[in-house]
Amino acid sequence: MAVLDVLSHHSPNEEYIGEEMEPSWGEDPVIKAAFEKFKGRLKEIEGIIDERNTNNNLKNRNGAGIMPYKLLKPYSGPGVTGKGVPW
């Protein structure tokens, strides 16, 4: 249980990829456009993860104690693995 707890929590000072653009990137329109495209794709991936978490027809999505998958969600919050919900 302790290992599961440690591995399922984010550090409060984590930085997430695609969350904020480096200030110097905003000066180059090509880099800025690529970053925005990347950030949009991360949001799509998060939507796919959320959709799969709610699909009871997927393997291992039925039964007692099934937690939603949030560990690699692009925008999961600090602390617990998810935005106020244990990942």
Image: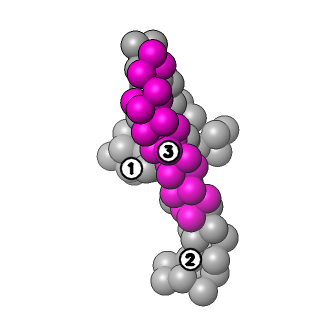
The tag earlier along the polypeptide, 1 or 2, is 1
The residue segment tinted magenta is 26-49
Residue 41 shown in magenta = yes
Q: Position of residue 79 (x, y in %)?
A: 52, 31
Q: Nearer the viewer, mark 1 or mark 2?
A: 2
The amino acid type of the residue labelled 3 equals: Lys
Taking the spot 46% from the left edge, 27% from the top edge, the residue there is 29
Residue 39 versus residue 31 in the image, above or below:
below
Callout 1 secondary element: helix
The tag earlier along the polypeptide, 1 or 3, is 1
- Quarter of the view holding residue 82: top right
- Quarter of the view holding residue 80: top right
Hey, which residue is sitting farthest front in the picture?
29
Q: Which mark is residue 61?
A: 2
Taking the spot 61% from the left edge, 59% from the top edge, the residue there is 47
Residue 58 shown in magenta = no
For disc 3, the marked residue is 37
Q: Residues within 10 Å of mark 3 (few under 14, many from 20)?
A: few
